[in-house]
């Protein structure tokens, strides 16, 4: 049987467990939080007072902080691209009522709230240029992106495992920075988003773990291939108006590293966590090719640390159209 057909068989086998994964890792709509739980109600008599407070406490947040928060929000808002990409993965039939397609739709529904609440907060804060941000979001969706997974479910689930943990880290640290500046509302919002991302990470890493149990050699090769290519985050492709695709990413990344939201060392740490959880060291029954792939992956984190040590993070901020130099318009 070809590797492609084996993948389809494994996806069908795992699908029997997907319903339980939905129950374990996703929250019913009637029980989960909604953006209105955090934002002032526009029909409330206290709306203007609450709005004034949001604008006031937002003044103490740094320029780099706003750049990172905007980049995180834009990444969340590009959700249509992520759903269409996942629905196209081999073994996920979007035209059926399969549990795989059900998972993707329910996961998408949860993720949709993240960009929604952050977008509304940025709008209410009065600290950013919403039209420029909206252009960036539209560009990211219109441009699309290539995360080099093709339609391979093994590679795609490695990607989502990595990416979900990365977004958890980013939102969690943004929450802490906001809290430290006395912005409890924004801190709570980002904290609960981080909690959602953690649940999603736990699910996707479980998908991969289950695949390792059924098809260890091919899963090992897929994991190694993704590590060689390096995980490309969706925000890698962001740009501002008048720029080319991906022009804004480098400076956005520098801002995130300057304030410690997401660094090259975090990338390595995620890699190590996945290697440990999937028990790569003790995999049994690997082909010779997969054994070589495992050896490569096991040595990779230390190599990546040496690369991270050589990265220079400039102290100076880069001006974005999203935010004025002093953080106000």
Image (spheres, rainbow, N blue to C red):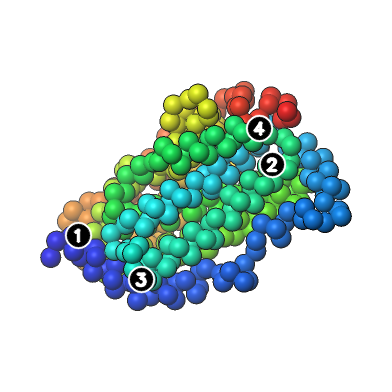
Q: CA distance from mark 3 to mark 4?
A: 42 Å
Dot 2: element: helix
Q: Tell me: residue 41, above or below residue 25.
A: above
x and y percent of residue 111 in the render?
53, 56
Instruction: State the residue in front, 182 or 96.
Output: 96
Residue at 33% from the left image edge and 64% from the top image edge: 95
Q: CA distance from mark 1 to mark 4?
A: 47 Å
Dot 1: element: helix
Q: Residues within 10 Å of mark 4 (few under 14, many from 20)?
A: some
The numbered mark, 2 or 4, whose residue comes first in the sequence reads: 2
Q: Residues within 10 Å of mark 3 (few under 14, many from 20)?
A: some
Q: CA distance from mark 1 to mark 2?
A: 46 Å
**Quick one: quadrant of the N terminus?**
bottom left
For label 2, the residue is 123
Which of the two marks, 1 or 4, is nearer to us in this view?
4
The numbered mark, 1 or 2, whose residue comes first in the sequence reads: 1
For label 1, the residue is 4
For label 3, the residue is 98
- The part of the image, by quadrant, that contains residue 258 is top right
For label 4, the residue is 129
Residue at 18% from the left image edge and 64% from the top image edge: 5
x and y percent of residue 147 in the render?
36, 44
Q: CA distance from mark 3 to mark 2?
A: 38 Å
Dot 4: element: loop
Q: CA distance from mark 2 to mark 4?
A: 8 Å
The numbered mark, 3 or 2, whose residue comes first in the sequence reads: 3
Q: Residues within 10 Å of mark 2 (few under 14, many from 20)?
A: some
Q: CB under 8 Å between callouts 1 and 2?
A: no
x and y percent of residue 65 in the render?
66, 37
């Amino acid at each position: 049987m070809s590797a492609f057909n084996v993948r389809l068989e494994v996806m069908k086998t795992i699908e029997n467990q997907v319903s339980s994964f939905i129950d374990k890792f996703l929250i019913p709509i009637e029980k989960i939080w909604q953006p209105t739980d955090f934002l002032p109600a526009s029909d409330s008599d206290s709306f203007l007072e609450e709005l004034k407070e949001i604008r006031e406490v937002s003044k103490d947040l740094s320029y780099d902080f706003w750049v990172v928060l905007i980049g995180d929000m834009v990444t969340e808002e590009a959700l249509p691209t992520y759903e269409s990409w996942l629905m196209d993965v081999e073994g996920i039939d979007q035209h059926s009522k399969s549990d795989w397609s059900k998972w993707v739709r329910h996961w998408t529904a949860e993720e949709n709230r993240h960009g929604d609440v952050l977008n509304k907060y940025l709008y209410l804060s009065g600290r950013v240029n919403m039209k420029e941000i909206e252009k960036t979001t539209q560009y990211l969706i219109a441009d699309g992106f290539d995360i080099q997974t093709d339609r391979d479910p093994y590679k795609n689930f490695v990607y989502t495992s990595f990416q979900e943990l990365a977004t958890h880290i980013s939102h969690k640290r943004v929450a802490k920075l906001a809290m430290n500046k006395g912005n409890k509302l924004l801190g709570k919002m980002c904290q609960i988003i981080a909690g959602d991302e953690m649940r999603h990470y736990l699910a996707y890493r479980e998908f991969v773990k289950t695949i390792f149990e059924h098809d260890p050699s091919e899963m090992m090769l897929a994991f190694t291939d993704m590590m060689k290519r390096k995980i490309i985050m969706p925000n890698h492709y962001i740009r501002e108006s008048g720029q080319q695709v991906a022009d804004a990413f480098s400076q956005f990344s520098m801002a995130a590293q300057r304030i410690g939201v997401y660094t090259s060392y975090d990338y390595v740490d995620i890699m190590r966590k996945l290697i440990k959880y999937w028990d790569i060291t003790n995999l049994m029954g690997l082909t010779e090719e997969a054994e070589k792939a495992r050896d490569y992956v096991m040595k990779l984190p230390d190599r990546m640390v040496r690369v991270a040590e050589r990265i220079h993070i400039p102290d100076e901020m880069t001006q974005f159209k999203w935010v004025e130099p002093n953080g106000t318009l």
